[in-house]
Amino acid sequence: MKHIASRENPHFKALKKLCQSGRERRKTGHAVLDGMHLIESYVRRFGKPEEIVVSDSGAGREEIERYLESGDAGMTLTILADALFDELAAVETPSGVMAVIAQPRCAHGVNQEIDAILLDGIQDPGNLGSILRSSAAAGFRQVLLSADCAQAWSPKTLRAGMGAHFQLDIHESCDLPAFLGGYRRQAILTTLDATTGLYAMDLRGPLAWVFGSEGQGVRPEVSESTPLRVRIPMPGATESLNVAAAAAVCLFETVRQRQSF
């Protein structure tokens, strides 16, 4: 166990860089989980984190203290002065505990025979995390992200995912048109001008749902590789849905159809 009270401490600087730099997370292959919910979700699937970081005040909180005494905590324990911990936290009210983990990697490549979620240019970490959460809840395990998506393992995406990351096979920086070119099932894109409504589409077989960026939708090369289009019926006056909401509607209509037969 080590206690850090100085901003000049090399280990604190490394932690701060890992929390704030996507480049650092890609280089090291590590990520930071903020809060007990994410940590417990990780532990259930993968076991002990590499390191647990707690604040001085957090170490005295009942839930965190119980976890540290359980034997499930990481191999390394670092205690930070509250002011230093607050610098790492991405929220106004810090949780008092973080974990450093190696980003889980899929032991296999993408599978062009099974369900998939394809995300093209989703920029907002909150939207990305929400889509991952809906994907896990709907039973879609395989998720492919284009190179210009928000980073899946950023603190904000992890927080929005609420532990869904650890139920999924997440593939980042994917060539989506190449995947679609070899996909052996139906791939579907939602658009406002499609003639076929979502609820008229047969979604019972394996399929790939394709969702595009918040402002521009999918890129032309992805659109050209996705011949099936559906629209989500919106009888109200709203012009369109947030991409995370649209994904949830489509995924759970898929669940409804598959459970009805």
Image: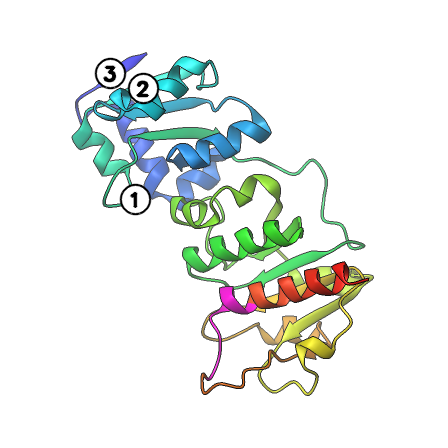
Few, some or many residues within 10 Å of mark 2 (<14, 14–19, 20+): many
- Pick whichever, 261 or 228, lies toward us: 261
Q: Residues within 10 Å of mark 3 (few under 14, many from 20)?
A: some
**Mark 2 touches mark 3? (CB < 8 Å):** yes
Residue topped by disc 2: 78
Q: Amino acid at mark 3?
A: His
Q: Which residue is mark 1?
A: 90
Q: Amino acid at mark 2?
A: Thr
Which residues fall within the magenta stretch?
239-246
* Sequence-first tag of 1 and 3: 3
Residue 217: image x %, image y %?
Answer: 53, 74
Q: Is residue 65 visible?
A: yes
Q: Position of residue 150 (x, y in %)?
A: 46, 55
x and y percentages locating residue 67 in the rendered image: 40, 20
Is 189 colored magenta in this rendering?
A: no
Q: Secondary structure at mark 1?
A: loop
Q: Residue at x 53, y 57 (%)?
A: 131
Sequence-wise first label, 2 or 3: 3
Residue 81 position (above or below residue 111): above
Q: Is residue 224 left or right of residue 28?
A: right
Between 70 and 157, the one nearer to me in the picture: 70
Task: Give the SS element for disc 3.
Answer: strand
